[in-house]
Amino acid sequence: MKFPLYFSKKIAFSKDNKNNLSRVIVFIGRLSVALGVIVSLITVSTGLGSKKAIKERMADFSGHISIKSKQSNNSYNSSILSTEGLQVKKIKELPDVATTQKYVAVSGIFRNEHNFAGIIFKGVGKDFDTERFSKFLIAGKSPKVTENGFNNGICISAKIANDLHLKVKDSIVAIFSKENQSPLYRKFEVVGIYKTDIKQIDDIFVIGGINHARKIQGMKNTEVGGIDVFLKDINDIDIDAPKIDKLVGYKNYTVKATEEYPQIMDFIAIFDMNIALIIIIMLVVVIINIIMVLLILIIERTNSIGMLKTLGATNGQIRMIFINYTLLIMVPGLLIGNLIGIGFLLIQKYFGVITLNPENYYLSVVPVELSVVHIVLISAGILLVSGISLVLPSYLISKISPVKAIKYN
């Protein structure tokens, strides 16, 4: 088996290829491989990066897993979270749990002389993860909540700020209403403006002090409407959700961030189909070009094939020579494709050259998930599939007669 590999190396790196038809064929083959690698790398890295980025944005804002009362009936207005069977300490001790934070949510309306907007006031406590939230801030700071009295500072989205012509340090009146009660008016000061690029969040959510929400909902100072559980890794959400669900009690339930916004998850699911479709198309293009390269090389070297058969080489050995030869031709294309593809992805990762419309894509910049595993799998996969696809066309060699091949010009 060493002979086919040795011989294929000799003809692959021979200087005789520089002034004949194989020079053009080799260039076409390498170009198709390089383009296939570049497109595949970009597709996989940006596709997986987008999926992860959207999931992380949802989870970092509202918790990877939220614990709610069954009495809330999926309403934005929080009901009192039952403490029966709720084991917060054990939840925090789970190895994948990073932190937890309590909250009370209540619906209301912002109104001023410019406009009005329906809102969900999410009251957070002193355990609010300001560091995690800070990645969304575009102006000001996170509201400082001590739970001693009422904190009037709030953080609103850029969308709400634009609609109501608000900026940091401006005041805004919120109106909250409950059944059979007079409307409740609260005046807040805007201390921060955030942006998640997720329309379902930016359109309505306002972050403020938990005591305001407790007061509006008629809760005691020790009662909460829900608990956000943050995990160390978004990929563990499906594994840890059942574990946490066992620790919340029968009167409460858990909801994953990926279930909170099903329309977004439907959008994310499209990425898997697109990634698979583009990779299949690129593989087909590469395979067609590589088969074309093999067939032309066989025709071009018919004389050499006849000579090898005359010297005792078997059809199998000659087929392996040309398969190895074609695969060796692909290697520079793989290297060039990886260099260009990885270079482009690194530029996008650190400089964000390509932007998106968040209204349509839930992201303002194309994210990149660059992994050594993906790089190796793409290159190895192209080589492997190409090698397998070359087996059948290589049987053309067995049809070549040694006598006629030696006379062939």
Image (cartoon, rainbow, N blue to C red):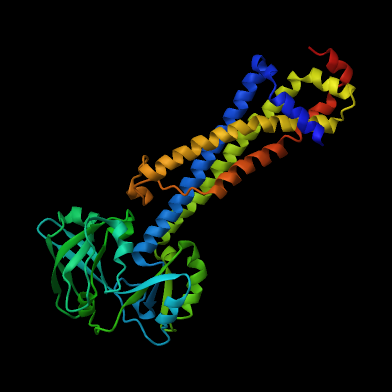
Which residue: 37% across, 40% down?
Answer: 354
Residue 395 appears in the rendering: no
Which residue: 38% across, 71% down?
Answer: 99
Q: Which image quarter holds the C terminus? A: top right
- Quarter of the image for residue 66 reads bottom left
Closer to us: 241 or 34: 34
- What count of labels does the image hold? 0
Residue 42 appears in the rendering: yes
| Residue 293 at x, y percent in the picture | 67, 26
Q: Is residue 369 depicted above or below 296 in this figure? A: below
| Residue 78 at x, y percent in the picture | 30, 76
- Quarter of the image for residue 279 reads top right
- Quarter of the image for residue 277 reads top right
| Residue 122 at x, y percent in the picture | 27, 69
Q: Is residue 369 depicted above or below 146 in this figure? A: above
Horizontal side of 358 relative to 270 (left or right) equals: left
